[in-house]
Image (spheres, helix red, strand yellow):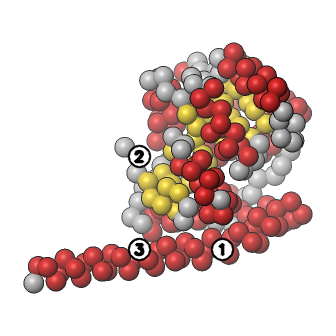
Amino acid sequence: MIRNAQVVSFPVAALNYERAVGAVMEDLEAGRGGYVCVANVHMVMEAHDDPAFAEVVEGSRFTTSDGMPLVWMLRAQGLKEAERVYGPSLTLELCASAAREGLPIGLFGGTEQSLDDFRAVLGERYPDLDVVCAISPPFRPLMAEEDAQYTARLRESGARLIFVGIGCPRQERWMAEHTSRLPNAMLFGVGAAFDFHSGRVRQSPPILQRMGLEWAFRLVMEPRRLWKRYVIHNPRFVLLALWQLIRRRARSTASARKVQKTAS
């Protein structure tokens, strides 16, 4: 059973890599498709600002805690088993499982070069992995004909796991819109995982990731693209998260007093 707790905008699952991969493989074995969101502070705040996007995230099979602030929020609400399930690492864990189980995968997102580089990395790590489809869509809204062609390619490829790396919130909306057209596949929004694993974008050192400071590293690396995401979203998330915990504590205290009063 997957336990969840609200983190400002939507429920987040208290998982680790083993349980996340196990849940996905169980669904695929049972013939169930769907999509998985990999949430960080940016996604939480996008959902807070756009209730329609919050509904998209809530429609997922489950939402993992990609960022440490989300893990801390889950643990603060009593879900001590919660661990970070980082999108790029989850991607590799799923690819390893797909290689063992003989499940074909598809890639959607990135540039042609980044996909070629990522496929080379996968080939070295998992020689038995079958990458049956790799699509680099244009960096603009797709025309209906293009969208239909890409969807048909993914469906006809037979891919059971499809990794979608076109950025938040675009990738989550795309998955929600296309999951019914790809009924035999599980879709994963993995952001920049293709670029991270192909070495095109540097990942934060592990110590900064554990401290919840990956955002600072990425801001230094890409200030022009990411400044708004971190400078505006992060302080707002802290305030909203604290307010959520304060309200939760107040409700718990009021409930305890009510029980005590009733008992006396």
Instruction: Residue type at mark 3: give it.
Output: Arg
Q: To which residue does mark 1 refer?
A: 236
Residue positioned 66% across, 74% down in the render: 236
Q: To which residue does mark 2 refer?
A: 2
- Tell me: 154 left or right of 32: right
Question: Looking at the image, do the residues carrying marks 2 and 1 touch, with CB atoms under 8 Å apart?
Answer: no
Q: Which mark lies nearer to you, 3 or 2? A: 3
Q: Quadrant of residue 139?
A: top right
Instruction: Residue type at mark 2: give it.
Output: Ile
Q: Position of residue 25 (x, y in %)?
A: 50, 29
Which label was assigned to residue 248? 3
Q: Position of residue 161 (x, y in %)?
A: 62, 28
**Residue 164 vertical position relative to residue 135 in the rendered view, above or below:** below
**Image quarter (top left, top right, bottom left or bottom right) of the N terminus:** top left
Q: Is residue 98 visible?
A: no
Q: Which mark lies nearer to you, 2 or 1? A: 1
**Residue 40 vertical position relative to residue 142 in the rendered view, above or below:** below
- Tell me: 165 left or right of 237: right
Residue positioned 83% across, 49% down in the render: 201
Q: Is residue 35 visible?
A: yes
- Tell me: 46 left or right of 111: left
Q: Position of residue 7 (x, y in %)?
A: 52, 62
The earlier-in-sequence mark between 2 and 1 is 2
Instruction: Residue type at mark 1: give it.
Output: Arg
Give the crowd class for mark 2: few <14, some 14-19, many >=20 residues within 10 Å. Answer: few
Give the crowd class for mark 3: few <14, some 14-19, many >=20 residues within 10 Å. Answer: few
Give the crowd class for mark 1: few <14, some 14-19, many >=20 residues within 10 Å. Answer: some
Question: Looking at the image, do the residues carrying marks 1 and 3 touch, with CB atoms under 8 Å apart?
Answer: no
- Total count of labels: 3
